[in-house]
Amino acid sequence: MTVRRLIISVVSLFAVALPAAAQDISEKPIVRWYYQSFPPLHITDGPQSGQGFADKTLAFLHARLPGYNHLKVYSSLTRMHSELKARTNACHLGLFKTPEREEYAYFSDPVIEVMPNRLVVLKEKASRVTPFLNREREVDLDKLFAAQGLMYGVEINRVYSPRINPYIDRQTKADGKVELPSPRYAALLLHGRIDYGFAFAFEASFRFKMLGRGSAYMTLPIAGEPDVLENYVGCSKTEFGAQVIADINRVAADVRLAHRGFYEEWLDDRAIRDLRAAIKARDSKAP
């Protein structure tokens, strides 16, 4: 075969293959995945863009659902809920299940496990909160908020949990409360302006790493809080949404395990120990 005929053959092969591939892609149904910027769940800018633990989990899930075209859509939480109600093909990874949301969304089996908000303190100053720990080394909020002389930072209008908020909502600046317009607790801790704060463990990791002090802090569990919170994929409550959820459930166990690894990348040592112990205790009780 001459070089000219070889080139013609190759060009002809691509001329047939490319439209077929394009047609195969276009025939796949589209799933619209809504997500928000909340590092390090989803990181939407900077050198780590797309490397949040929810980013990685979503990519892992997409790879195991090859029968769909997956379209990521950046949006607010308000818009995401509106789209779940209005569209036939909207989904969101990491949704808490509530009776209200079940009226407009189908939910998968649990695919994400995270810990609730915890107390954040510098390692070098952890002794300041030691007197307020119970036998399980959890923070006793009654003792903590009865203490004098400690300053703590909380974000304005943030809902931490039904356990934490009743305490901070009835306190004032005179009680040591420092209200923050943004999550600046890491900087204030490092500069000695506050003694502790509250945040998700993964969130604290991101904040301290951004300041170049990723190993300076630790997080402690709050007594009375759940050990682990389960999150789900929520999809439009339509026939199509039900099919997507059914396909997700077939790979949910693999997704949950993969997510655990991605999630632990953003936890301090104490949080990792607590997470593993909680999951082990839960699984040991499973039938």
Image: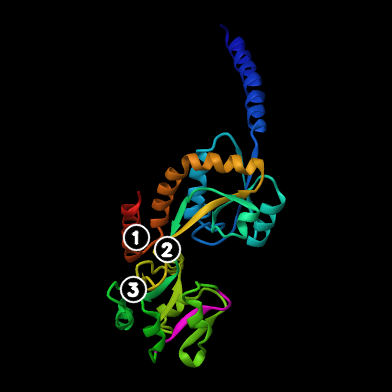
Which secondary structure lies at badge 3? loop
Q: Give the quadrant of residue 255.
A: top left
Task: Quadrant for the N terminus, please.
Answer: top right
Residue 278's mark? 1
Which secondary structure lies at badge 1? helix
**N-terminal-most mark, 3 or 1:** 3
The residue labelled by disc 3 is: 138
Answer whether residue 207 is visible to the viewer in this image. Answer: yes
Write down the region rendered in magenta: 150-158
The residue labelled by disc 2 is: 115
Mark 1: amino acid: Ala
Judge left or right: residue 215 versus residue 4: left
- Find out whether the residues at labels 3 and 2 contact each other: C-beta distance under 8 Å: no
Residue in the image at 54% along x and 73% along y: 159
Mark 3: amino acid: Glu
User: Where is residue 91 shown, x and y percent of the image?
Assistant: 61, 49
User: Where is residue 275 shown, x and y percent of the image?
Assistant: 36, 60
Judge left or right: residue 185 versus residue 129: right
Number of numbered tags placed on the structure image: 3
Observer-nearest residue: 4 or 201? 201
- Find out whether the residues at labels 2 and 1 contact each other: C-beta distance under 8 Å: yes
> In the picture shown, does residue 11 fall above or below 129?
above
Residue in the image at 33% along x and 54% along y: 285
Residue in the image at 29% along x and 72% along y: 136
User: Where is residue 146 shown, x and y percent of the image?
Assistant: 40, 89
Judge left or right: residue 199 versus residue 272: right
Q: What is the C-alpha distance between the residues marked 3 and 2?
A: 13 Å
Which secondary structure lies at badge 2? loop
**N-terminal-most mark, 3 or 2:** 2
Mark 2: amino acid: Met
Q: Give the quadrant of residue 31.
A: top right
**Residue at the extreme right of the image, as rendered:** 86
